[in-house]
Image (tube, rainbow, N blue to C red):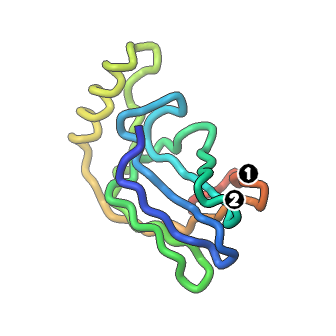
Amino acid sequence: GVCEVSFAFTDGGDLVAVGRNEDGDRTGFGSQLFFAPKNDLGSWKPLEVSLPQRFDSPRLVNVDGSLLLFARFARESYAAVPTWLPFGLQRFGNLLCYSLLPKAAAVYHLSPPLRDGTWRERTLE
């Protein structure tokens, strides 16, 4: 499941959120993005597949109309364990492998989804 969630509002009033998906779910492991239109802020629409990066302690802010994500991360994909293994072993193995990796801090530009909630192919840069 998703934890450590941060959110921001676009200039148009829509909600965009990012959360760490360390425990995994039907969308995979890593991080998850969400969108809710300003007229229905209680209906968060997630990505179909989690982002492969795990963003620790994310902070999402709107700076002059640009959504910026500040987070600690590792360069390698969080989903390091093969998907053919049982889900519990994937969860444990991913956490163990990630714990051994060096971490850094980064700032990303996040492109909000289109008006219909569809995410762009290059969401994070």
- The residue to which callout 1 is attached is 118
- 37, 117: nearer the viewer: 37
* Mark 2 residue element: loop
How dense is the environment of label 1, judged by Cα within 10 Å: few (below 14), some, or many (20 and up)? Answer: few
- The residue to which callout 2 is attached is 113
Residue 60 shown left or right of residue 16 in the figure: left
Type of amino acid at the residue the image marks with label 1: Thr
* Mark 1 residue element: loop
- 88, 121: nearer the viewer: 88
Residue 58 shown left or right of residue 111 in the figure: left
Task: Give the answer, above or below, for where 65 lies relative to 116.
Answer: below
How dense is the environment of label 2, judged by Cα within 10 Å: few (below 14), some, or many (20 and up)? Answer: some
Q: Which quadrant holds the C terminus?
A: bottom right
* Quadrant in the rendering for residue 41: bottom right
Q: Which of marks 1 and 2 is nearer the N terminus?
A: 2
- Check contact, mark 1 vs mark 2: CB within 8 A: yes
- Residue occupying image coordinates x 59% and y 51%: 44
- Residue occupying image coordinates x 75% and y 60%: 114
Residue 65: where, in percent of width, then height?
Answer: 62, 81
Residue 110: mark in rendering: none
Residue 76: where, in percent of width, then height?
Answer: 39, 44
